[in-house]
Amino acid sequence: MDQANHQMETFGALLRQYPQSSRFYDSCTPQQRQAILDQLSQLTSHAQIQGFVEHLPSAAL
């Protein structure tokens, strides 16, 4: 599996673990979602992606 697919799979799994982040992501416009997904390419570890997802709602404030 390539890095981008792994990042997307990890992101989706973590969204299921963080309902508040999932609700936030679901409420985003397509452009906002793309901006979030574009940032995933900069995250290389599970811990980085987890921190990103965990703080996703507060990042928009």
Image: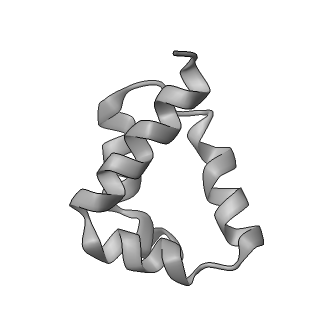
In-image side of 3 versus 48 (left or right): right
Give the vertical position of 33 relative to 7 (above or below). below
In-image side of 49 versus 50 (left or right): right
Residue 61 visible in the shown view: no
**Percent coordinates x, y for residue 51 in the rendering:** 32, 48
**Percent coordinates x, y for residue 31 in the rendering:** 77, 69
Q: Residue furthest top?
A: 1
Residue 7 visible in the shown view: yes
**Percent coordinates x, y for residue 22 in the rendering:** 38, 70
The residue lying at 41 percent from left, 50 percent from top is 12
The residue lying at 69 percent from left, 70 percent from top is 32
Q: Which of 45 and 17 is in front in this view?
A: 17
**Percent coordinates x, y for residue 56 in the rendering:** 43, 65
Q: Quadrant of residue 10?
A: top left
Q: Which residue lies furthest to the front in this view?
A: 1
Q: In which quarter of the image is residue 24?
A: bottom left
The residue lying at 38 percent from left, 37 percent from top is 48
Give the vertical position of 41 relative to 16 (above or below). above
Q: In which quarter of the image is residue 57?
A: bottom left
Instruction: State the colouring used for the structure image.
Output: one colour
Query: How many badges with numbers are in the image?
Result: 0
Give the vertical position of 50 relative to 26 (above or below). above
The residue lying at 35 percent from left, 59 percent from top is 15
Q: Residue furthest left?
A: 17
